[in-house]
Amino acid sequence: MGNDFARKNMWDSEYRPEQMFTRDYILKKYPNLIIKLEYPQPRLKLDGKPYRKCILDIAIPSKKIAIRLNGGYHHISSRQGLKDEFQKEALLQSGWMVIDFDSYKMPNLFKGKYNNKTIKKAEEEIDIMLTYEGNDLIV
C-alpha cells in the first residue's frame, strides 16, 4: 500500500474506505485468498429457525471468516446492537468465525483519510484484530 492507496478517491466506490483498506491489506499479506465485499448470507438459522439474510462487510468464504466493520452507529443504537448480536450468533451457529472491527477500537482504520502515519497505524490495528492469543486467525 502507501501513498497511491491513500490518494485514491475512495468515496467514488460502492464500498466504504475501511472495507477497501482492510481487503487490500489482507490481500497484501495473503495474496492467494479470495476476499468478498458485501457478501450475502441468505440462509442462516438461529437456534434451528430461519434467520434473515445478512450481508457481510468482508468475507473470506473458503475459511468461513466474516469481518464486520462496525461504525459509530452500531454503538449508539440499542436496536442495531441487538440486531448485530443476533446476526453474530446466527453466523457462529452456521460455522463462521466472526471478527468485529469496531470504530472505537480502531480509530485509524475508520478515519477514511489515510496518510503514511495513519496507514501504518491502521495496519497495526488490523493485525491486532486478526491475532488471537498470538495466533494468526486467517492461516
Image (spheres, rainbow, N blue to C red):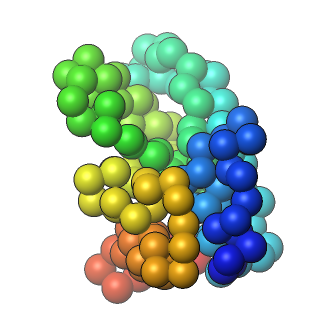
The mark total stands at 0
The residue sitting at 74% across, 41% down in the picture is 12
Please say if 75 is above or below 5: above
Q: Residue at x 46, y 37 (%)?
A: 91
Picture quarter with the C terminus: bottom right
Position of 74 relative to 95 (above/below): above
x, y percent for residue 80 = 31, 23
- Residue in the image at 68% along x and 77% along y: 3
Q: Nearer the viewer, residue 116 or 54?
A: 116
Position of 44 with respect to 131 (left or right) is right
Q: Position of residue 44 (x, y in %)?
A: 53, 25
**Above or below, comparing residue 94 to residue 123 in the picture:** above
Q: Nearer the viewer, residue 98 or 118?
A: 118
The quadrant holding residue 133 is bottom left
Residue 100 is situated, as x and y percent measured from the top left of the image, at 38, 51
**54 and 62: which one is in front?**
54
Q: Quadrant of residue 87?
A: top left
Relative depth, front residue between 47 and 81: 81
Q: Is residue 62 visible in this depiction of the protein?
A: no
Give the quadrant of the N terminus: bottom right
**Residue in the picture at 66% in, 43% down:** 11
Q: Can residue 33 be seen here?
A: yes
